[in-house]
Amino acid sequence: MGIFSFFTKKQDWFTPAEHQAIINAIRASEKRTSGEIRVFVESRCSYVNSVDRAAEVFFGLQMQKTEDRNGVLLYIAMKDHQLAVFGDQGIHEKVGSAFWNEEVKKMIASFSKQHYADGIVQIVTEIGNALVHHFPYENEDRNELPDDIVFGR
């Protein structure tokens, strides 16, 4: 039993349509880039710093194993109102901390209006645009990570 084997319980954070809209945004973004985007949602953040929790989830999901080190994790703790975006070395070197901070601000603005799914779709799309710019789709690209939302505890 691995560290993430307990991440199987799906919460009712999103309607079926919202859930599908998020997955569609991930797929649409990834069709244009070699980058990988994952969304991880849980109730509570077990860390004081959500970036530390995002890093733990990122490495637990083995997202650092993408060929170009261009995986991005969007981490959300719904009940604690915490979120973070964690980009692997390849993409972080291209966009820098200012990009991630700006995306988090935009998502917080959507979340403050309780537009959770819309905020996630927006940030996934914008992360996808950054990935396309720095890691365009190549003919031999393959989907290295699942596109579905990962639900934690």
Image (tube, helix red, strand yellow):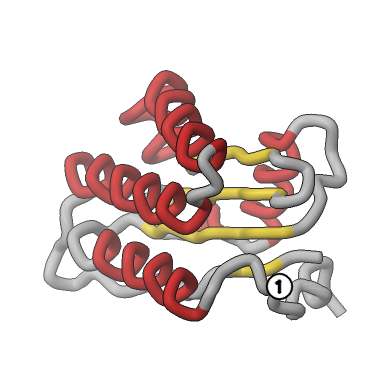
Q: Residue at x 67, y 35 (%)?
A: 51
Task: From the viewer's side, name the closer residue of 28 and 109.
Answer: 109
Task: From the viewer's side, name the closer residue of 40 and 67.
Answer: 40
Q: Position of residue 62 (x, y in %)?
A: 61, 61
Q: Position of residue 125 (x, y in %)?
A: 30, 51
Q: Quadrant of residue 26?
A: bottom left
Please identify the residue farthest to the left as the structure is shown.
139
Q: Locate residue 138 relative to residue 115 in the image: left or right.
A: left
Depicted 145 relative to depicted 72: above or below: below
Q: Residue at x 37, y 39 (%)?
A: 91
Depicted 68 relative to depicted 28: above or below: above
Q: Locate residue 133 relative to residue 80 in the image: left or right.
A: left
Q: Is residue 115 visible?
A: yes
Task: Quarter of the image for the C terminus: give it.
Answer: bottom right
Q: Position of residue 150 (x, y in %)?
A: 62, 69
Q: Residue at x 67, y 73 (%)?
A: 12
Task: From the viewer's side, name the closer residue of 27 and 133.
Answer: 27
- Give the residue at mark 1: 11
Q: Locate residue 124 relative to residue 54 in the image: left or right.
A: left
Task: From the viewer's side, name the closer residue of 152 and 142.
Answer: 152
Q: Residues within 10 Å of mark 1 (few under 14, many from 20)?
A: few
Q: Position of residue 71 (x, y in %)?
A: 44, 52
Task: Quarter of the image for the N terminus: give it.
Answer: bottom right
Q: Residue at x 71, y 73 (%)?
A: 11
Q: Quadrant of residue 139?
A: bottom left
Q: How many marks?
A: 1
Q: Locate residue 102 relative to residue 130 in the image: left or right.
A: right
Please identify the residue farthest to the front as the structure is shown.
113
Q: Amino acid at mark 1?
A: Gln
Callout 1 secondary element: loop
